[in-house]
């Protein structure tokens, strides 16, 4: 049974930004070292092999381009807006992804609610987590948070003795300028691509750091008349009116966007058929008249609108990012549906050869199939965003297998996929460790020469992203955005 109320409370993709927040804006960033984490990471191996050390050094010094986040804006984190706040204390760093591991480890619902409640003293929360911390701290989700806490707050291990320091350092860190400090100074991330969960497109005050994707989910799923229709001012009486709504978003923001994104795979398979407008029109009329649609009708309408949005994206040379594989949250993932994602991804590539598709999250756990798609279709690309913390070892193995199977210019190796910026730092460190291991093992096992491994580092960590998303041109445009 799908617990929709649980999804709405826990799934970061349905919460729409409500799990993060802050209360008081501080006047300055605390006086702390901005030494890049790559120089002192707990995940940096101390290899005695000179060839492996050369790979490690290069990986840890190379900037990452982060191709997928859900980050709130810094000013939203520093605001007291209750619509954007779950709880402004140290538990916020755990409030996306790790919260699900905590629940599936056995924390009761009532305790879980208290742990993330703003009404409970932050220091008292450790006693709620302690019985479950041993079970989750070694998962990818747990490691990302643990690393972030160590690097940002100077705490090696959460305990009753350190929780006061964690809370104090959390408060000291979350001050104006902390996004740039964490992302650029510490994580060595050149730029992020953000899929805003609150809006179809966010007019970021930091447009070259927090680049934005256009969300097309509500354009074709539903569709979402309120969130996508109302801002345009267009009166919706027909399918052509909704086409105008979709066009409005692309006209207004298309040249500033890095890509378009849909996570509709949380609701259904990505098997979109090309339904003509004359067949979709009567279904859309029923929708706006609030008549009940059959599941077949709903799918046909969504399919038509999906391809209309994809056509608009393709006309503007915007890649189409699609969620595949594992679901965030807990207790509602139909694994049999995920199994269908790779076959449907293959169909999409064949049906729209001029569209560049980005299949996200390596379709975990069905990642072998996704490698086959990238090998076969010129317009298929794979993004490893989120994968490093879902299963770090599987992600490392995926990268190894991908690099000996499919073209290396179609792989994107990092996206933090967080709403809270602190955990991005921990995730980036895990990713660097995994990239280093994958390349090192390929050399040690005799598949690559050292030179071959070294020349792949820049492309897979940043060069591919620059080319696929046309970031040179986008950066120039984003420096002159009208909203700033």
Image (cartoon, rainbow, N blue to C red):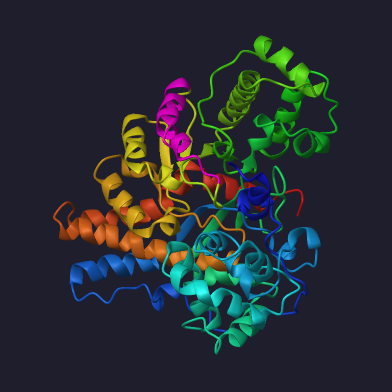
Q: Quadrant of residue 171?
A: bottom right
Q: Name, please, the residue furthest toward the bottom.
A: 161
Q: Quadrant of residue 178?
A: bottom right
Q: Nearer the viewer, residue 204 or 331?
A: 331
Residue 177 highlighted magenta (yes or no): no
- Give me the residue at 70% from left, 73% from top: 176
Quadrant location of the N terminus? top right
What type of secondary structure mainly makes up the magenta span?
helix
Q: Nearer the viewer, residue 233 or 368?
A: 368
Q: Is residue 204 above or below residue 332?
A: below
Q: Is residue 446 above or below residue 310?
A: below
Say left or right for 276 vs 120: left
- Give me the residue at 37% from left, 72% from top: 43
Q: Is residue 167 above or below residue 317?
A: below
Total marks drawn? 0
- Give me the residue at 73% from left, 12% from top: 282
Q: Position of residue 10 (x, y in %)?
A: 63, 55
Q: Position of residue 306 (x, y in %)?
A: 60, 27
Q: Is residue 192 above or below residue 405?
A: below
Query: Does residue 105 appear in this view?
Result: yes
Q: Position of residue 148 (x, y in %)?
A: 51, 73
Say left or right for 240 vs 45: right
Quadrant location of the C terminus? bottom right
Q: Which residues are magenta?
A: 332-351
Say left or right for 69 vs 457: right
Q: Quadrant of residue 88?
A: bottom right
Query: Does residue 148 appear in this view?
Result: no
């Amino acid at each position: 049974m799908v617990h929709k109320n649980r999804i709405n409370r826990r799934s970061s993709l349905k919460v729409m930004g409500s799990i993060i927040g802050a209360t008081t804006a501080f006047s300055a960033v605390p006086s702390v070292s901005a030494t890049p984490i790559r120089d002192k990471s707990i995940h940096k191996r101390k290899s005695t092999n000179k060839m492996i050390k050369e790979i490690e050094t290069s990986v840890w010094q190379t900037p990452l381009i982060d191709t997928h986040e859900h980050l709130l804006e810094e000013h939203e984190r520093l605001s007291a807006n209750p619509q954007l706040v779950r709880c402004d204390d140290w538990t916020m760093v755990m409030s996306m992804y790790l919260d699900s591991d905590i629940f599936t480890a056995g924390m009761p619902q009532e305790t879980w609610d208290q742990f993330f409640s703003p009404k409970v003293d932050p220091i008292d929360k450790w006693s709620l987590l302690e019985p479950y911390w041993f079970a989750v701290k070694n998962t990818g989700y747990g490691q990302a948070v643990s690393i972030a806490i160590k690097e940002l707050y100077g705490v090696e291990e959460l305990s009753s003795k350190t929780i006061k320091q964690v809370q104090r350092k959390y408060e000291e860190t979350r001050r104006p300028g902390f996004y740039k400090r964490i992302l650029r100074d510490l994580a060595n991330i050149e730029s992020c691509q953000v899929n805003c969960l609150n809006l179809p497109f966010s007019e970021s005050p930091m447009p070259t750091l927090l680049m934005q994707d256009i969300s097309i989910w509500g354009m074709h799923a539903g569709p979402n008349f309120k969130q996508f229709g109302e801002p345009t001012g267009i009166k919706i009486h027909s399918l052509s009116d909704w086409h105008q709504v979709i066009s409005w978003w692309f006209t207004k923001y298309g040249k500033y966007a890095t890509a378009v994104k849909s996570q509709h795979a949380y609701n259904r398979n990505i098997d979109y058929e090309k339904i003509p407008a004359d067949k979709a029109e009567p279904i859309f009329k029923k929708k706006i008249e609030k008549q009940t649609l059959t599941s077949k009708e709903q799918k046909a309408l969504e399919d038509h609108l999906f391809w209309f949005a994809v056509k608009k994206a393709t006309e503007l040379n915007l890649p189409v990012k699609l969620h595949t594989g594992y679901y965030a949250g807990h207790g509602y993932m139909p694994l049999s549906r995920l199994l269908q994602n790779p076959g449907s991804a293959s169909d999409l590539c064949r049906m729209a050869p001029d569209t560049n598709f980005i299949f996200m999250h390596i379709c975990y756990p069905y990642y072998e199939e996704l490698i086959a798609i990238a090998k076969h279709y010129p317009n298929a690309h794979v993004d490893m965003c989120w994968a490093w913390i879902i299963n770090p070892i599987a992600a490392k193995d995926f990268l190894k297998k991908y690099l000996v199977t499919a073209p290396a210019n179609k792989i994107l190796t990092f996206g933090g996929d967080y709403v809270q910026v602190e955990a991005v730092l921990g995730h980036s460190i895990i990713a660097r460790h995994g990239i280093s291991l994958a390349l090192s093992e390929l050399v040690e096992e005799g598949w690559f020469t050292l030179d071959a491994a070294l020349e792949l580092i820049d492309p897979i960590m940043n060069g591919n992203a620059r080319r696929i998303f046309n970031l040179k041109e986008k950066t120039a445009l984003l420096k002159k955005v009208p909203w700033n």
